[in-house]
Image (spheres, helix red, strand yellow):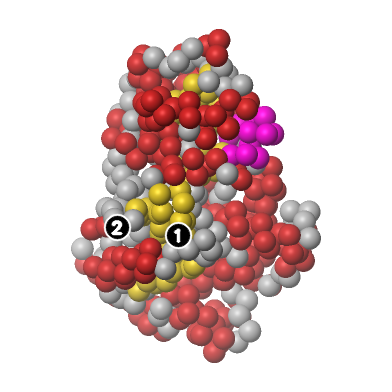
Amino acid sequence: MQVSTINAPKRHSPVAESMSKSNSRFSSSLNSLLKNNKSETFSYRQIFEWVGKYVPFEIGLIVSTMPRGGLQIVQPQRIPETMARLYSKQFHAEDKVTWQAILDQKAVTGKQVWGSEYSKTPYVSQFMELIGLQSVAAAPLSQPVLNGYAGALVLFRGPEQGDFAPADLEAMQEIAQDLDGAIDKNRQQRIGEACANSITLSHRVPVRQFVFDKSMRQLMPDSDLDQLEENVRAEMLKRVKQEFARMNNAEITDRLALPDSRGDLWIFHLHPIKDYPAIGGPVVFCNLQPASCEWAAVRPADFQADSELARLIPALKFMEEEFRRGPTLTEIAHTSHLSPFHFHRRFTELLGLTPKHFMLDCQIEESKRMLAEGKKPLAEVASICGFAHQSHFTSRFKQATGLTPTRWRRLAAERRIAAKVM
């Protein structure tokens, strides 16, 4: 293993593999649509117009899993306000069709998922029908917003458009594959710039999510537990088992730090949910957190369907740029035009980490880069990265990584030498 920068995870899913060599009947028209796109984000209005040429629908969405656990509607900008509000508040936990597409890695309809219970399920009777929708289908996307976090293209039809036919699902599968590649290429350009100098001692697994049911089965495709070191895997399973044993109505999330064989900490967001019908009952999400540079590469337009979440995104960029001087919570909240109290509460709920933790992650990432360079003494690294003094830096660095700065620098040097020998 060698010191490495953070790169896009390698894809292993059937959707991703076929997408990487896609010659689908839709790819040329998508390429034509996007060839003049020089911005950091797409025009999702044009994207959905393109989708509608091949698969008619009334409302189209892109839904993504999130590091905090659960699902989030992320596109498009203009959807019925009632739909966005109800989904975020309640029906993401009932969205079995999206989860089935993600877990099975193939396009599915709601009627295939729920069968004879379709019209009785709350997702249909209390969510879709309230907005005048009758049919739903979803096709998997490997990582529509964040590296390692899966999602789906979800299309709805009204009564006059009829059900989705097998040919519609086949088209959705191909369209999602082509769209996957376009979204990913656009995002990786941003992440490549933001994370160019981000240093890790070990490569992170390509899929960042681990979702367990009450039988302790890991449900996410390609989230192979064997990709984790044995001690990380054992501690994760031990903690997940404890969460199921004590699960109650109080859903308490936790920041789980697990050391690997080098003592380097892997930071997960642990989120147990007692009742999650979309996956069949109680579940525990255990999600490897994105690096601060990956968060900083996210743009408000990546979350156009949720204006509240989108307005929090500039704060990430602000903190990533200003962490060295230690901006106050009031300053940070001002970038989102929110009170400090409301900003802190919503930031933590929607992103799965506190502003304080994000600021510390920024400090740690910068200090790792400087330690790996090996040119500056610890006191100078501490000062540049915004720590009060060297002992404060050493304490916080060890708390965040499991290693002292001196040991981390030594390991980084050893990995660098080993890399040159290889």
Label 2: state its secondary structure: loop
Can residue 413 be seen here? The reply is no
Quarter the C terminus occupies = bottom left
| Crowd around label 1: few <14 · some 14–19 · many ≥20 (10 Å) | many
- Residue 362 placed where, x, y %? 56, 66
Can residue 421 be seen here? The reply is yes
Residue 7 shown left or right of residue 57 in the figure: left
Does the magenta-highlighted stretch encompass residue 365?
no
Judged from this view, the residue extending furthest toward the left is 422
The magenta span reads 74-87
Q: CA distance from mark 2 to mark 1?
A: 13 Å
Residue designated by label 2: 216
Residue 264 shown left or right of residue 248 in the figure: left
Q: Residue at x 48, y 63 (%)?
A: 248
> Image height check: is 419 above or below 338?
below
- Residue 24 placed where, x, y %? 35, 19
Residue designated by label 1: 272
| Crowd around label 2: few <14 · some 14–19 · many ≥20 (10 Å) | some
Mark closer to the chain start, 2 or 1: 2
- Out of 408 and 90, give the one closest to the viewer: 90
Residue 290 numbered tag: none
Q: Residue at x 54, y 89 (%)?
A: 391
Judged from this view, the residue extending furthest toward the bottom is 391
- Residue 191 placed where, x, y %? 50, 49
Quarter the N terminus occupies = bottom left
Label 2 sits on what residue type?
Met
Label 1: state its secondary structure: strand
